[in-house]
Image (tube, rainbow, N blue to C red):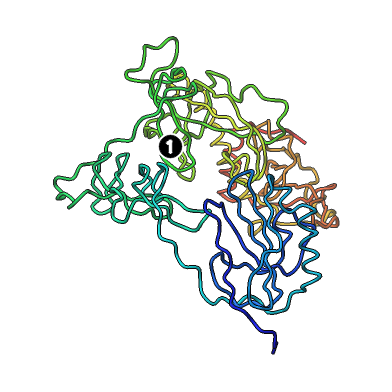
Amino acid sequence: MSTIPLHEIEIPAAEDGAVKPWRKRLEALDETKRGGYVCVGSWVEPGAVYRLPAGALIVGVDRTSETARRVRLWRVTTKGELTATRDSVFKSYAAEFGDGVRKTLRSALDKYPPTHQGPQLVRAAAPQAPQPNERADHCALCRRPVPAGAGLLVGKPGSREVQHKPGECPPLRNERGQRCSACGGWVEPGDGLLSSPIEGVWNVRHDGTCPPEAERQAPPPPPRRRNERAGTCVRCGQDVAELDGWLIPPAAVGGSWSVEHDGECPPPADQHTGPTWRITAGVPGRYEPVPSSYWTLGQVGRFEVYEWEQPVPEDAPGLVRVHGMPSLIGVVVSEERPWYSRDEDGDSPSDDLIGESGWFFSGRVRLATEEEAAPLLAEEGEAAIDRALGARVRLVLSWRYPREGARYLPADELAQELADVELVELRTRPAAECTAIGRGLYPERVWIAEGRDWVMTTAHNGMDGDDWSLSNWGREIALLHPMTDELRRLVDDLTARYGAGTAA
């Protein structure tokens, strides 16, 4: 235990008007730092009493203005007194701990090296009686104006603020309309009282008792916003110039804002009238070159549309729903300017751009008329027939998972089976698809022969896992499927759809 005697020392108080004054017991110097940061030691409070050993050094700084920076150094004497060893006033921040002051501090530390006994607080600084404010300011509690002399200065020297005298803060009124936090009714601006903010939001309550439920005022509708950019009216499909329409907020978080005309829609000028729906598309790729458009105005096609603005009628041409998303046959009536979406956080505006950067397109379509939709509906009907036939072929004539009764013959036995047989290749797909090499469960070629009770399928041998030793018809694998009633109906339907076939 140290035997060095300790003295009770009152730290000099801050000067009047000083801004953020400070005191520190000096224990070392860090001359790599600037300003007061050069002083290393323990903080002590101005005006407080501490137990300190003889030789202890105290550094104090009082800044009363930008050109008055007072730096003092005190030392505790063996008689328990605090004596000033330096008292200087500087005009700039750089000079207050310049070479001269550092030399003084360095010499003092060499002469009076610090002990390991830190300052021991005996008595905190006595609180000062609040002083009246000499200048008009705003109250730190209610933010209302406080005339000169009508309030008090509170806080520590250097960081004092103005407050109303206790009990004199006027009640805080709401400056804008808001729901009452107690009853949920609407409170007009200035008619309510503000309460302390929760998570940064001020609550409002009625001034006095909340009115009965039957007398509570309903909140007004939210204010409408003008369109700052030109857009397409969701009601008539015509263009709406900048600031000539109203914005319609999205129905869901993350959705797009829409535009409608202010009042009645104008007569059409060679444009479609009636409801329209939004369509979108994404094209992954680089920023350049900048595309001009994705669709063509007047283009008829099948589109998936968003119906959060308005529902799609059930009699829309070709309407189907895929995972709840309506798909219909429509006509493109407008297209907005595309914008480039960068995949920085995975939040993509389009399914086509998930995990990728690319161009995002947005447009609007109307319902196609019966005449406009007829060719596409007919094309889709033909495609549906082809898909149904293809599904039957894959089911009945599967070569990877053949049905019971299908025969695989070695090459020599197959050659005997096909001797003196005139094979006819039967088309199983539309002509446009016949050039593609079949894969999976779909046979590449189907053969029939008059007078035979089988249908032969051949598939290319060469997929992953295939054994070339299975090739029994050139480089292909041939299977003989028994001619069942189901298979005969399939052959008849394929012949009726795609023709009688071609002789080998």
Residue 485 vs 106, above or below: the answer is above
In the image shown, does 82 or 355 lie closer to the viewer? 82
Total residue callouts: 1
Residue 35 vs 490, above or below: the answer is below
Residue 371 location in percent, x, y?
45, 19
In the image shown, does 259 or 325 lie closer to the viewer? 259
Q: Residue furthest bottom?
A: 1
Question: Is residue 488 toward the left or the right of residue 439 in the image?
Answer: left
Residue 51 location in percent, x, y?
60, 78
Which residue occupies 35% across, 20% down?
262
Which quarter of the picture shows residue 379? top right
Q: Amino acid at mark 1?
A: Pro
Question: Is residue 184 toward the left or the right of residue 202 in the image?
Answer: left
Residue 198 vs 189, above or below: the answer is below
In the image shown, does 183 or 37 lie closer to the viewer? 37
Q: If the image is split into quadrants, where does the N terminus sit?
A: bottom right
Label 1 Cα neighbours within 10 Å, binned few <14 / some 14-19 / many ≥20: few
Dot 1 lies on which element?
Answer: loop
Residue 223 location in percent, x, y?
34, 32
Q: Which residue is mark 1?
A: 250
Which quarter of the picture shows residue 78? bottom right
Which residue occupies 83% across, 58% down?
467
Question: Is residue 137 toward the left or the right of residue 395 in the image?
Answer: left
Q: If the image is split into quadrants, where does the C terminus sit?
A: top right
Residue 373 vs 406, above or below: the answer is above
Q: Residue furthest front?
A: 79
Residue 302 location in percent, x, y?
52, 30
